Image (cartoon, grey):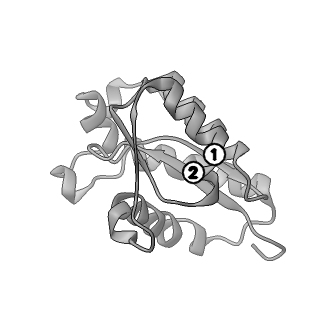
Amino acid sequence: MAHGFMYLTAILDIASRKVLAWRLSNTLTTDFCLDALNEALARFGTPDIFNSDQGAQFTSGDWLDRLKATGCRISMDGKGRWVDNVFIERLWRSVKYEEVYLHAYRDGREAQRQLAAYFDTYNRRRLHQSLDYQTPDEVYFGARTEELPAVA
């Protein structure tokens, strides 16, 4: 942004590429990441395996304790191995080139609004070649997106 930085985190279902939850923050702390994790767990349940990189937010006691409480297996990428987390890296590329680089957000509120619209389109309408030209919602829910209610 013109004045400062915003940090984005997302919880992604690898099989469908669906963004289950996301948060934007002007500080690089664990709390906004935990908010996204808690939303994803509440809305979509506990995964068998949860993978992340080794960033400070994802190696913090609060983050690990929350995941351990669910009973899922915790997987972390090898240090310096972006390819281990290629699915989220691909999402970040799409977000940057299809949304962020095209807009000069005035402030965090505008970024929040624009990204909400982007992720809605990404999940419900954006076709993915790797998903046989289906949307993430179609793959995740096994239904046409027209049948799904919009997420508020």
- Determine whether 51 is above or below 141 in the image: below
The residue type indicated by label 1 comes to Cys
Give the x, y percent position of residue 42.
Answer: 53, 22
Image quadrant in which the N terminus is located? bottom right
Residue occupying image coordinates x 38% and y 61%: 85
Residue occupying image coordinates x 63% and y 53%: 57
In depth, the one of 124 and 65 nearer the eye is: 65
Give the x, y percent position of residue 3.
Answer: 84, 74
Which residue is labeled 1 in the image?
Answer: 33
Dot 2: what SS?
A: helix
The residue type indicated by label 2 comes to Phe
> Residue lying furthest right in this view?
3
Side of 70 where 152 appears, left or right: right
Side of 103 where 144 appears, left or right: left
Give the x, y percent position of residue 4.
Answer: 81, 72
Which is closer to the viewer, label 1 or label 2?
Answer: 2
Residue 99 in which image quadrant: bottom right
Residue occupying image coordinates x 64% and y 42%: 61
Dot 1: what SS?
A: helix
Sequence-wise first label, 1 or 2: 1
Residue occupying image coordinates x 58% and y 73%: 102
Image quadrant in which the C terminus is located? top right
Give the x, y percent position of residue 64.
Answer: 56, 40
10 Å crowding of disc 2: few (<14), some (14-19), many (20+): some
Which residue is labeled 2 in the image?
Answer: 58
Callouts 1 and 2 close, C-beta under 8 Å: yes
- Determine whether 49 is above or below 133 in the image: above
10 Å crowding of disc 1: few (<14), some (14-19), many (20+): many
- Determine whether 33 is above or below 40 in the image: below
> Residue lying furthest left in this view?
132
Spatial distance from mark 1 to mark 2, Cα to Cα?
Answer: 8 Å
